[in-house]
Amino acid sequence: MAPGVARGPTPYWRLRLGGAALLLLLIPVAAAQEPPGAACSQNTNKTCEECLKNISCLWCNANKACLDYPVTSVLPPASLCKLSSARWGVCWVNFEALIITMSVVGGTLLLGIVICCCCCCRRKRSRKPDRSEEKAMREREERRIRQEERRAEMKTRHDEIRKKYGLFKEENPYARFENN
């Protein structure tokens, strides 16, 4: 494919294939989780993986405690567990890293969307005229050329009539007065 040529939209079957692959990756994670009714405190002093099988639990790495996730706030308060020690969902990502990563990914996505919108708007403004505009411009030019031809024909015909009757206009009618 030539450089600078747009490839077009992603085929619909590719989107479905990607969605199916993502679903297959998430099924084992969802199947391994315990129902939310189980108490989180019974997993204290066990492993992080055992605690996080229940989606409503939060693992505090500092004191090896399994706590109920405080659903009233987005982030767990520092009195419950420091963000650098808190784990939720997976054991290998702490809340600080999760917040930073999500902020970077979200900012990148927003920036990408803004850039795409700006590029699309610029391309629309600087786009060549469409077929109807080209046709109208071509017709205007043809009318102008025909009008000039008719004007030249009329001038020639009028000049012949003036010449025939001796009324021919001189190029500079005041030239005869300048010699005297």
Image: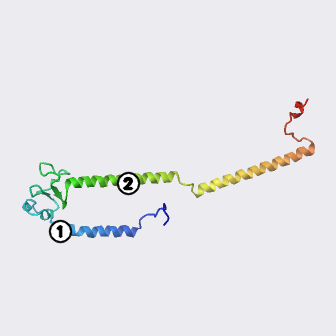
Question: What residue is shown with label 1?
Answer: 32
Mark sitting on residue 112 = 2
Residue 38, how many percent across, how many down?
11, 63
Nearer-the-camera pick, 180 or 170? 180
**How many neighbours does mark 2 have within 10 angstroms: few (below 14), some (14-19), or many (20 or more)?**
few
Q: Residue at x 12, y 57 (%)?
A: 61
Please tell me whether mark 2 sits on a helix, a strand or a loop: helix
Q: Residue at x 75, y 49 (%)?
A: 148
Query: Image point 50% across, 53% down: which residue?
Result: 124
Judge from the rendering whether residue 78 lies leftward or rightward of residue 172; answer left or right.
Answer: left
Q: Cα distance, mark 1 to mark 2?
A: 35 Å
Identified by mark 1, the residue type is Ala
Q: Amino acid at mark 2?
A: Gly
Which residue is at the front of the view, 121 or 180? 180
Toward the top, the furthest residue is: 180
Instruction: Please give left or right for residue 61 compared with residue 141 in the image.
Output: left
**Residue 90 visible in the displayed image:** no
Mark 1 residue element: helix
Q: Residue 157's x, y, as percent?
A: 85, 48
